[in-house]
């Protein structure tokens, strides 16, 4: 058995409804601009050429229901409500027709974003990591198995801040559907159980401040919540 100089990093895992075992998180892929109205509010026309991605470290995982400190280095910390797809089967160059076999479960997700840093890097054609790969910024609610959820369609996806609705759309508004995303992404990565895909956010993103309470939901899935605490 290998000894380690420092303790091994903890495994990040998400609860699964009805299962005693948890879903260990491997990689977190995020789809960019997958709702036309959100692309427009970010100042872009929708690019229908192909989906595109950024990533968050697995250690950015944050369970739903908790409080996180307002993160350092930003004055414009934004919420993004998203459908999370949890991969349960290895897949490489998966055809669209077989892509849904790779889905183990779905969940509500938040892609919390240092928007000012994302925009600063975007305008200089630099990577988005400081804006997106933020500690505690990949919030995932307990997962619901795909067999219990069905498929993404007309389900409502919504988010509130302090009870006021900010985002309200349908999963059918997604430009790239779940099977198309999995098929495309698996052309670049060997997908494996534990991978999570955040599928993009509807219009209405905006800032939060210390003391704000975020709630969100998708029809058929467990609600998500997050409280923003004071800066460290
Ligand atoms: Mn996002």
Image (cartoon, helix red, strand yellow):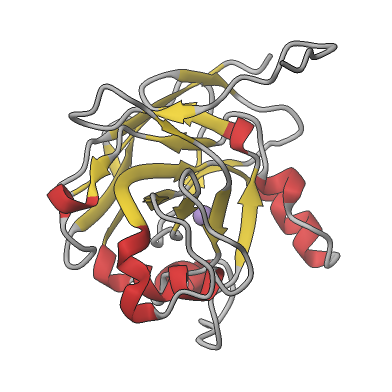
Could you tell me how many numbered marks the image carries? 0
Residue 21 locus on image (x, y percent): 32, 25
169 shown above or below 134: below
Q: Please tell me which residue is depicted at 30% across the width and 48% down the height of the picture.
A: 106
Q: Nearer the viewer, residue 6 or 158?
A: 6
The image shows residue 126 at horizontal and vertical percentages of 84, 61
Quadrant housing the C terminus = top right
Instruction: Name the foreground residue: 79 vs 59.
Output: 59
Q: Residue furthest bottom?
A: 49
Residue 47 is at least partly visible in this image: yes
Could one spot residue 217 in this view of the protein? no
Whole-percent x, y for residue 17 in the image: 22, 31
Residue at the spot x=63%, y=70% of the render?
188
Q: Residue furthest front?
A: 1
**Is residue 13 rendered to the left or right of residue 45?**
left
Above or below, 31 relative to 96: above
The residue lying toward the viewer, choosing from 225 and 59, is 59
Q: Residue at x 66, y 27 (%)?
A: 71
User: Which quarter of the rendered picture does the N terminus lie within?
Assistant: top right
Position above or below: 123 against 231: below
Residue 141 at x, y = what percent? Answer: 34, 34
């Amino acid at each position: 058995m290998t000894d380690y100089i420092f303790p091994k990093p903890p495994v990040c895992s998400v609860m699964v409804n009805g299962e005693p075992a948890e879903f260990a998180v491997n990689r977190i892929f995020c789809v960019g601009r997958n709702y036309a109205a959100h692309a427009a509010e970010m100042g872009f026309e929708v690019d229908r050429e192909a989906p595109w991605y950024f990533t968050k470290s697995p250690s950015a995982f944050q369970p739903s229901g908790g409080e996180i400190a307002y993160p350092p280095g930003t004055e414009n910390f934004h919420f993004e409500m998203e459908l999370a797809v949890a991969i349960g089967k290895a897949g490489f160059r998966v055809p669209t027709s077989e892509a849904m076999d790779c889905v183990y479960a779905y969940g509500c997700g938040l892609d919390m974003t240092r928007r000012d840093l994302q925009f600063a890097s975007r305008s200089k054609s630099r990577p988005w990591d400081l804006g997106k790969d933020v500690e505690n910024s990949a919030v995932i609610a307990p997962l619901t198995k795909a067999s219990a959820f069905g498929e993404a369609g007309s389900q409502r996806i919504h988010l509130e801040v302090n009870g006021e609705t900010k985002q309200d759309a349908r999963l059918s508004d997604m430009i790239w559907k779940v099977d198309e995303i999995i098929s495309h992404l698996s052309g670049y990565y060997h997908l494996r159980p534990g991978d999570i895909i955040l599928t993009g956010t509807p219009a209405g993103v905006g800032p939060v401040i210390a003391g704000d309470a975020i709630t969100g939901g998708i029809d058929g899935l467990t609600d998500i919540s997050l409280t923003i605490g004071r800066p460290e």
